Amino acid sequence: MYGKHRFSGRLFIVEGIDGSGKSTQLSLLHKWLESEGYVASFSEWNSSPLVRDVTRRGKKKEMLTPMTFSLIHATDFADRTEHYIVPPLKAGAVVLADRYIYTAFARDVARGVHPEWVRGLYGFAVKPTVAFYFRVPLDVAMKRILGGRDALKFYEAGMDLGLSDDIEESFRIFQGRIIEEYEKMVDEFGLVAIDATLSIEEQQSQMRQIVTEALTGTKKARIRKWLDLTSLAKGSRE
Amino acid sequence: MARFDFFGEGLPGIDLEELKGKLIVLEGTDGVGRSTHTGLLKQWLENNGHAVLDTGMARSALAGKAIRQAKEGHTMGSITMSLFYATDFADRLENEMIPALRAGFIVLTDRYIFSLMARAIVRGADPEWIKDVYGFALRPDAVFYLRVNVDDLVTRVIQTTGFDYWEAGMDLHLGEDMYDSFLEYQRRLLKEFDSMAETYGFAVIDASRSIEEVFDDLKSRVSGLLGPAPDPASGKVAGCFYETYR
C-alpha cells in the first residue's frame, strides 16, 4: 500500500471527460519538461501490456458488468503502478499520467458501483503531487468529440446501462453523470480545476506555473545527449 | 428474508431474494485434494438428482486465459495478481454462480475468496484492503476446509504434480530453492487459512485421511446442509435421493 508517497519523484496527472483537451495539455507539458531537462515518463489509462487485451476483448464482446469493468481497470492500473509509476518515482523522475484513479471513481460510480468500495479498491494507489481536472461543459466536449471521431464507443457512451437506445443521447446522459462525480471530487481530493474552455496556450501556461512550483528540488538528467537521442529515435519511428 | 447476503458492499443490481440454490465451497492449500473431492461430490450430488455447477479459479471467460498467460511470464506484481484474480472471480460470480443459484442449482466451488485473500496477505497486502475488495462476494452456505500439515503436503506434491513456481511462492524469494520456498510459503498460507477458519467458521476436514474417509465425511456434512428431502411420495427422484442420504 503506497498512499501518500515519500518517493523523491513527482506525479502529475490529468483528469476530465473525453473532449476536455486533457491529453493535449499533458503532451505539451511532457515536451516542455523534457526540454527543461527533467526525466519524465508517461503512463496512460488502460495500457498495461498484461491486461489491456482482456479489457479490449471484454468491451468488444460486451461481456463487462459494472463490477468486472471496475475490477479489470483496477488490475490494469495495478500493473502500471507496480511497473511504470512506482519505480520511476523512486528513481526521482517525473511521472505523467493521462487519467488516474479519479476516472475510475467517476465512471464506476456513474455505473452504480458503490463509491466507498471503489475508493477502497484503489487504496494501493500513489497520491499524485498535483491532480489537474479539466472542467468543460458537456456541449463543448461533445462538439470536439463528434467532430473528430466517426463513432462513439459502446462503454464510453454508457450503452451497457440502458439509458437510451440512441448512442448520442446515452453518451450525453452518461457523461453528464461523470461530470457530476468529478465535481464532487474537486473538494474531496483537492483536484486543481482548469477551465478547459480557455485557449490551449492559456491552459498550458497555468499548468506550467503550478508544475514549476511543485518541481523544486526535482533532479534533472545529467546527460542531455541521451535524451536528445531518444527523442530523435522516437521521431524517426513515427 | 433472502437466504444469501454479501460480505460487504454487494454487487449492484442483484436481487438476493431470487437466489434459491446452495453455495458450497471447498478450500485449502495446494495439493490437499480439493479438486478430487469437488469432482466426487459433483458426481454424487448429480446421481441424487441435484443440478450442480462446479467452478474454480482462473476459469472465467473474461480473464482465465490472460491470468494463465500472465503467470507464464513471471512478471506479474502482487497487487496486479490479486486484482486479476478478483476480476476472474467477479466474472464467474456474476455470470456463472449467481445465475445457477437463481435457477436452484448447487454451486460447488473449488476455492473461493479465502484462497485469494490468503495469497494476497502472504504477499504483503493489507488484510483489510483485500477483505473490502471481496465485499461483493456472496456469503456461502458452507466452507469445507480441507486441511493437511505442510509435511504431508510436500509428500503429496512430490507424488503428484511436482513443485510449481507460484505454488512454491517463488515470486516471494523465501528460500534458496523451490523446496525451501514451498515449505515456507505453504506454512504462511496455512497460518492464514487457520486464522480465517475461526473468523469465518469453516468446517475443518482432516484431509490427511484416505480419499474414501474424507469423501464420506464430506458427504455426511453436505447431506446435513441439504436438509430433509421432499416428501418421498411426491416424486420418485426425491424419494430416491432421500434414501441415499441415510
Image (cartoon, coloured by chain):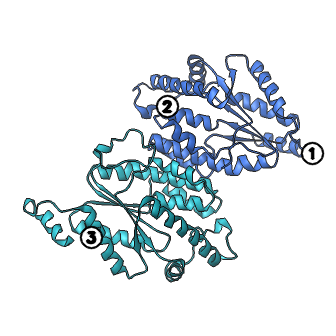
Q: Residue at x 36, y 77 (%)?
A: B214
Q: Is residue A136 left or right of residue A162?
A: right
Mark 2 neighbour class, 10 Å CA radius: few under 14, some 14 to 19, many 20 or more? many
Q: Position of residue B127 (x, y in %)?
A: 57, 54
Q: Same subunit under labels 3 and 1?
A: no
Q: What is the display colour for chain A? A: blue
Q: Residue at x 64, y 63 (%)?
A: B74
Relative to B149, residue A158 above or below: above
Callout 1 environment at 10 Å: few (<14), some (14 to 19), or many (20+)?
Answer: few
Tell me which corner region of the image, top left, top right, bottom left or bottom right, holds residue B212: bottom left
Q: Are marks 1 and 2 in contact (CB under 8 Å)?
A: no
Q: Position of residue B180 (x, y in %)?
A: 64, 77
- Chain for mark 1? A
- Are the two marked residues, 3 and 1, in contact with CB atoms closer than 8 angstroms? no
Residue B201 shows in the view: yes
* Residue pointed to by mark 2: A110
Residue marked by disc 3 = B44
Amino acid tagged 2: Ala
Q: CA distance from mark 2 to mark 3?
A: 45 Å
Colour assigned to chain B in the rendering is: cyan
Tell me the subunit letter for badge 3: B
Q: Residue at x 77, y 47 (%)?
A: A88
